[in-house]
Amino acid sequence: MKNLLFSAFLLVLSTSSYADFEAPGKGVALLMGGVEKPFEFGFEWFAPEDKFTIGKKAYNMDLPESYSIAMTLDKEEEQVWIQEFHKGFITGFNWEVGPHKLSLRKEVFAQRVKGDFILNVDGIDYFLLLNNVSIDFHFKNDGIDMIKLEGVTKDRGTRH
């Protein structure tokens, strides 16, 4: 009986040490001409099975440190391509993933910024510096730890 109780205790202890999370993602991709195309793209971690879900695809793997979404500006600097959101180019997006809100919009300023794009992450505006921007999601066992950006600036791209 002691062995059975001890085994049950270990089972409860081991399963409680697992951490799972769901960071569902819903958004709208904005296409040329004002067309809106809804999309779903989020993350999920199921520790007992070592299963990580990215968008609609699940993988048997350890929890990754991060996942990067690449955003590529077209030659004319009018649209971007993000393979996770839409098969073609888009002019912007609104996306909620877990507790985070991200958006990409165009706005014309007196001093031009690259593509006239503003990338907003959780209420903070960023301006494109490069034609290729990386949105990096860093994970911990219980969810998205942080979002880091590469190829952007907070100063409207005017500082050299």
Image (cartoon, rainbow, N blue to C red):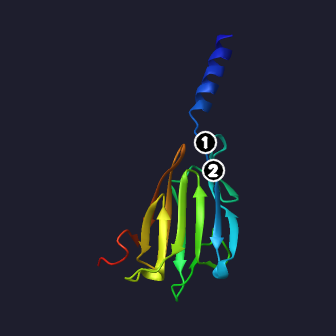
> In the picture, which quadrant includes the N terminus?
top right
- Horizontal and vertical percent for residue 144? 52, 50
Q: Residue 2 carries which label?
A: none
Q: Is residue 151 visible?
A: no
Q: State whether residue 65 is above or below residue 116.
A: above
Which residue extends farthest bottom? 76
Secondary structure of residue under mark 1: loop
| Dot 2 crowding, Cα within 10 Å, few <14, some 14–19, many 20+ | many
**Mark 2 → mark 1, Cα distance in angstroms:** 8 Å
Q: State whether residue 35 is above or below residue 123.
A: below
* Residue drawn 36% across the image and 77% down it: 157
> In the picture, which quadrant includes the C terminus?
bottom left
- Contact (CB < 8 A) between labels 2 and 1? yes
Q: How many marks?
A: 2
Which residue bears the numbered disc 2?
A: 44
* Residue drawn 64% across the image and 26% down it: 11
Q: Which of marks 2 and 1 is nearer the N terminus?
A: 1
Which residue extends farthest left? 160
Secondary structure of residue under mark 2: strand
| Dot 1 crowding, Cα within 10 Å, few <14, some 14–19, many 20+ | some
- Horizontal and vertical percent for residue 12? 63, 26
Which residue bears the numbered disc 1?
A: 20
- Horizontal and vertical percent for residue 77? 51, 85
Q: Nearer the viewer, residue 27 or 46?
A: 27
Q: Nearer the viewer, residue 36 or 24?
A: 36
Residue type indicated by callout 1: Asp
- Horizontal and vertical percent for residue 109? 42, 80
Q: Is residue 101 visible?
A: yes
Residue type indicated by callout 2: Glu
Q: In this view, does 58 lie to the left or right of 21?
A: right
* Residue drawn 68% across the image and 16% down it: 4
